[in-house]
Image (tube, rainbow, N blue to C red):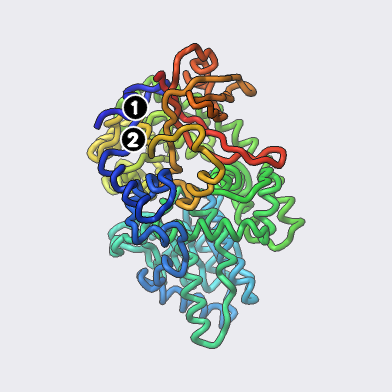
Amino acid sequence: MSAYLGVETSLTGRRWVGPGALRERQAEALAQATRLPAALCAVLAAREVEPEGVEAYLAPSLRALLPDPRRLRDMERAAERLLAALNAREKIAVFADYDVDGGSSAALLLVWLRALGHDATLYIPDRIDEGYGPNEPAMEALAQDHRLILCVDCGTLSHGPIAAAKGADVLVIDHHLGSETLPPAYAVVNPNRQDEPGDLGHLCAAGVVFLLLVEANRQLRQNGVQGPDLMGFLDLVALATVADVAPLIGVNRAFVRQGLKVMGQRGRPGLVALSDVGRIDSAPTPYHLGFVLGPRVNAGGRIGAADLGARLLSTSNPHEAQQLAQRLDQLNDDRRAIEAAVREEALAQAERRGLDGPLVWAAAEGWHPGVIGIVAARLKEATNRPAVVIALDGAEGKGSARSVAGVDLGASVQRLAAEGLLVKGGGHRMAAGLTVARDKLEAAMERLGELLARQGAGTGGAGDLRLDGLLMPGAATVELVESLEQAGPFGQAAPAPRFAFPSQAVLDARRIGTNHLRLRFGDRGGAALEAVAFGAFDGPLGPALERRGPGLWHFAGKIEVNSWGGRNRVQLRLDDAAPA
């Protein structure tokens, strides 16, 4: 396929790829059948939505998309055991991962149990002292005082620690890849068990916990008891789904769409307080979940007290919520400073090693384990390759890895552990964690690169820029943006629509702050559109456009509504540009 608008190499070094002839015909057919705007139909065609499915796609509902929880193995058994513990007034502990998905999963259970008159014990392991997932000392201690332990967003590979919980039953509610054998738990509910078909493998842990509560509520109704209204829990499921980079397909679309509506009602003290410190002054969006709220919830587990995020999300006390949110906000500022230093060192090391292979990686002493996951994500974004960042400490290193679309990183890391090149490792398609012996580091990374190369990692350069079609400035209206938002939510596996504006003249260009660009461009018809490019001066985009010149440009980006001074206007979030 030829480059879109003939752009083989843009200012950011990317090749532009637009819809082919077949997709354009599909979009035209959708527009004729539905009378919807052509730009929206282009997006629907890219999602392979048929005319008869348009209405349901644009209004994803839980009624239509929620799977029967009993499709998951051990689900009915897990719910029965949870309700038995409630009825017998047994002490219950919730052991959760320290990230947003773990904190949200824990909060779902804590709030649900509290609504039924039961206070459970929360346990979040310390990232540095205990590491990810259940450990034997913690599980032994919890088992001494609790009859039931729920491990959420962790536990599928924790054979030894779960066996150590003598005297207690353990329920594992997880979504990470399982091995050939399961731990000795009372129940393991996980759509990514090897004996599951995998059709629900896109769920994050909070989504699986939500299904557990749906099943528990169903069993309560059968016994004549009304359980808590679970629609009010969807804000937590939405937050976890977006922050854990779960693909926004199937029921995940309904979780996020409905969850954002619940969040907009500002009924959960923790999310209200966090939204306020994050200065969210509009209706919440997936962007807010992933880039404003999520990092702050994560900050406690990264560099502070591991349980802060789960405590914030589960509290019913507005005063406590405000204090926790302020503390997490400060920790997030500290995290940014630590991350920036590690990111600079890691990128420099990776560049010396070479960025043209199937894997980029970096390892060093003294790096804070709490930021290596974020730094791995930054390396992945900068190179369009899977990335691993490892914090070395003595004879071992703890690493975090992030993948690109189409490359199953979790399976490769799990295979590396099975081959003995890792002390331990696991995860899912897009992210994984690992522990590696220092003397096996080079061999492990070389082998991981081989496994990833077999899946096609490293075959591209900076990556293609995919576009949904052409727009002209006069067509970019508030009404069009609102129409396009019906195809959302946008995120992992469902990117926000991106359009090209061909042959535009730069009318004004100026730097904002230290590295951002504000731009105004127009066409021969006299219509004009404003654009903003964040971080434009970190690369070639800002300097080239600031100079302007007399020539015309092709611009590419996402249109959005900018609300300022009580007035709504459309602007382009500029991603790329090329001389026309």
Farthest residue toward the left? Answer: 454
SS category of the residue bearing label 2? loop
The answer to which of 271 and 563 lies nearer the viewer is 563
Packing grade of label 1 (10 A; few <14, some 14-19, many >=20) is some
Q: Based on the displayed image, in which of its 4 quarters is residue 564 positioned?
A: top right
Q: Are marks 2 and 1 in contact (CB under 8 Å)?
A: yes
SS category of the residue bearing label 1? helix
Q: Position of residue 561 (x, y in %)?
A: 58, 41
Is the C terminus in the top left, top right, bottom left or bottom right quadrant? Answer: top left
Farthest residue toward the front? Answer: 525
Packing grade of label 2 (10 A; few <14, some 14-19, many >=20) is many
Q: Which residue is mark 1?
A: 5
Residue 464 falls left or right of residue 209: left
Residue 390 falls left or right of residue 123: left
Q: Earlier in the sequence, mark 2 or mark 1?
A: 1
The answer to which of 69 and 101 lies nearer the viewer is 69
Q: Which residue is mark 2?
A: 18
Q: Residue at 73% x, 61% y: name it.
A: 317
Query: Considering only vertical position in the picture, is 509 above or below 143?
Result: above
Is residue 158 visible to the viewer in this orientation of the structure? no
Q: Which mark is residue 182?
A: none
Q: Based on the displayed image, in which of its 4 quarters is residue 402 positioned?
A: top left
Check disc 2 and give the amino acid type.
Gly
Residue 208 falls left or right of residue 464: right
Q: Residue at 48% x, 81% y: name it.
A: 219
